[in-house]
Image: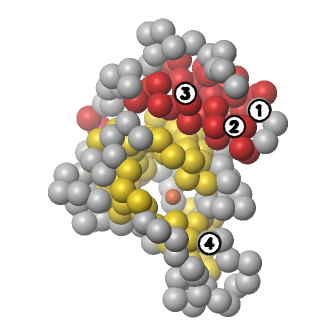
Amino acid sequence: MPSTESTQTYDLDAFVADLERVVATATTEREVTERVAERLRVLLTSGLQLPEETTTPLPDRYVMRPLYVAADGRFSIACAVWNVGQRTPVHGHETWGVVGIHSGVEHEVPYVKPTRPDEPLRSLPAHDWTPGEVTVCCTKDDDVHMVACGGDVPCIGIHVYGADIGTLSRRTYDPDTGAVSWFVSRWGG
Ligand SMILES: [Fe+2]
């Protein structure tokens, strides 16, 4: 379906306005993620400038900082930063998500979402995402992965989720046993 959203003078404010329209009119997670991904590709090719305070890595862990959180909590936009050597646990999202790479390489290992609580997780082929690339990282039925910095410079991604991801309760998994722990990632400083 051709996009009806604007592509001129595209910046974060225009992206937010388009996302408001997308989440208000899309009827399925497939539609919302396809339309968000199309807009995110445009944003990443429009010379998006991110404030330094959002892109500075932390020394001890990866961090997600808010670029925008919808007042009604229907979506959020995060700047996700991994320093060299940092990685997430295997985790889920409990909502849809679209990820675009601003700089660096994001190394992703997807897993089949388990249907039972006590079986090891099955990994799928890993992928290295590079600047300008956009991927649908999750829908509610397919949302489990591990992400790491994939290169020798920090990785910075723009992540869009169908909730306030900094306050949403979601799962981490022990991939060897399938054991689940619930967590809230919280917005980083
Ligand atoms: Fe994730």
The mark nearer the N terminus, 3 or 4, is 3
Q: CA distance from mark 2 to mark 1?
A: 5 Å
Packing grade of label 3 (10 A; few <14, some 14-19, many >=20) is many
The N terminus lies in quadrant: top right
**Which residue was labeled with disc 3?**
39
Q: Which mark is residue 95?
A: none
Q: Mark 4: which secondary structure?
A: loop
Could you tell me residue 28's position as x and y percent?
79, 42
Which class describes the residues within 10 Å of circle 4: few (<14), some (14-19), or many (20+)?
some
Q: Which residue is mark 1?
A: 26
Q: Are marks 2 and 1 in contact (CB under 8 Å)?
A: yes
Residue drawn at x 53%, y 23% as measured from the top left: 15
Q: Type of residue at label 4?
A: Val
Three-letter amino acid code at the position of disc 3:
Arg
Mark 1: few/some/many CA within 10 Å (<14, 14-19, 20+): some
Q: Quick one: label 4 or label 1, which is nearer the N terminus?
A: 1
Judging from the image, what secondary structure is the residue with disc 1 in? Answer: loop
* Residue identifier under label 4: 112
Q: Position of residue 109 (x, y in %)?
A: 45, 67
CB at disc 2 and ligand 1 closer than 8 Å: no
Sequence-wise first label, 2 or 3 = 2
Residue that carries the numbered disc 2 in the rendered image? 32
Residue 94 placement: quadrant: bottom right
Amino acid type at image mark 2? Val
Residue at image position (81%, 36%) is: 27
Q: CA distance from mark 3 to mark 4?
A: 27 Å
User: Is residue 169 visible in this depiction of the protein?
Assistant: no
